[in-house]
Image (spheres, helix red, strand yellow):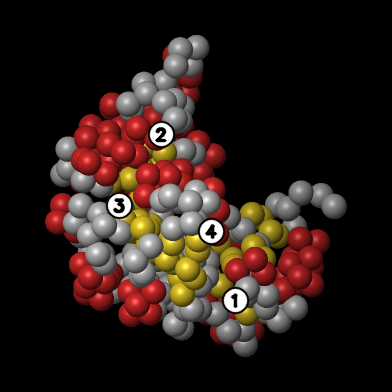
Amino acid sequence: MTAPKILLASNENPLGMPESARRAAADALAGAGTYPDSNGSALKQALAARLDVPPEWLVLGSGSSEILELAAQVSLKPGESVVYSQYGFVVYAQATAHAHARATVVPARDFGHDLDAMRAAIGEDTQLVFVANPNNPTGSFIEAAPLEAFLQSVPAHVTVLLDEAYTEYLAPAQRYDSIGWVRRLPNLIVARTFSKAFGLAGLRIGYGVAQPALAARMNAQRPRFNVTTPALAAATAALGDADFLARSYELNTAGRAQLAAGFDELGLAHLPSSGNFLAVKVGDSAAVHARLLAAGIEVSLLGNYGLGEWLRVSVGLPEQNRALLAALR
């Protein structure tokens, strides 16, 4: 089988890498014969200015997935409990296993987080809670007020990792000041990535924000040269490229609506999404997935999440979305 021509499986930005980041990464290759800045000073300064936090509050990772892993490493001893929601991002289970900890998976409510049940699941041996907002793969979103109340209710000795990989795709009315919450809550880590809206998935760079004591513990565990020189340069450039970020947001908002309308026309149930993807119920997902691959379109199976009748479709360019809908039809 030939390789798929339309890639809608991994929630990448269909615009690709911004030109500003491409130029910065290319220029940085001239210095690739020496090791990267192990502290990522230029990027941390740019992030510190953007977020209004000291650079010491920042942790750089090889994608935000490494931030999740670092949170588990510094929070957990073998056998201790990690709480996260059913249908939570697959890396939560992986990070728990890597720390030899015990997963407490809380049943979802309407395919999203049941915060009351998650709070009740926090036991004496719980040391870490993962919360995704929006959640991958279901796209569910938690409003600011209940989320803040939940974070404030978590015991101070329990670390909370708030995974905001898709936060740049939130509508203005959905946005909230999670960095302000970090200033008040010493047990909170906010994780974000340059892989999605910023278009740098292949360069593997993300970051965490936490108060200095927690950030220092994570930085002590972080591999010294975990982020490459081109990635640091590209992320710094992308962070300042407001036009590209606005285009990414607008394209995603329109494309998500395009896909939702198409699924409705086909009579296919789908979940409301605040990310750059939609979960759609197709029945025999393996067969539909195979047919789409044969048509040159790759989407994501969700059987490993217990969603065997569903597919996750990343939002593509308008013509890619049209091709996907035509193939489904």
Q: In the structure shown, which secondary structural element does the residue marked by tag 3 occupy?
A: strand
Q: Secondary structure at mark 2?
A: loop
Foreground disc of the pair 4, 1: 4
Q: Marks 2 and 3: CB-CB under 8 Å?
A: no
| Residue 93: mark in rendering | 4
Mark in front: 1 vs 2: 2
Q: Residue 278's spot in the image, x, y percent?
A: 53, 70
Residue labelled with disc 2: 222
Counting from the top left corner in percent of width and height, residue 206 is at: 40, 42
User: Helix, strand or loop at disc 1?
Assistant: strand
Q: Residue furthest top?
A: 33
Say whether residue 259 is visible: no
Comes first in the chain, label 1 or label 2: 2
Q: Work out how far the residue at label 3 is from the one at label 4, CA to CA, in angstroms.
A: 18 Å
Distance between mark 1 and mark 2 Cα atoms: 37 Å
Q: Residue placed at 62% from the left, 84% from the top?
A: 268
Is 240 left, or right, of 329 in this rendering?
left
**Residue extending farthest right:** 1
On screen, residue 282 above or below 79: below
Q: Residue visible at 64% across and 62% down? A: 300
Q: For residue 189, which numbered disc appears in the image?
A: 3
Q: Say which amino acid is labelled 2.
A: Arg
* Residue type beneath disc 1: Val
Which residue is painted at 39% across and 30% down in the image?
232
Residue at horizontal 27 percent and vertical 44 percent from the top: 214
- Quadrant where the C terminus lies? bottom right
Q: Which mark is residue 280?
A: 1
* Side (left or right) of 24 relative to 159: right
Choose the circle earlier in sequence order: 3 or 1: 3
Q: Position of residue 85 (x, y in %)?
A: 46, 70
Mark 3: few/some/many CA within 10 Å (<14, 14-19, 20+) = many
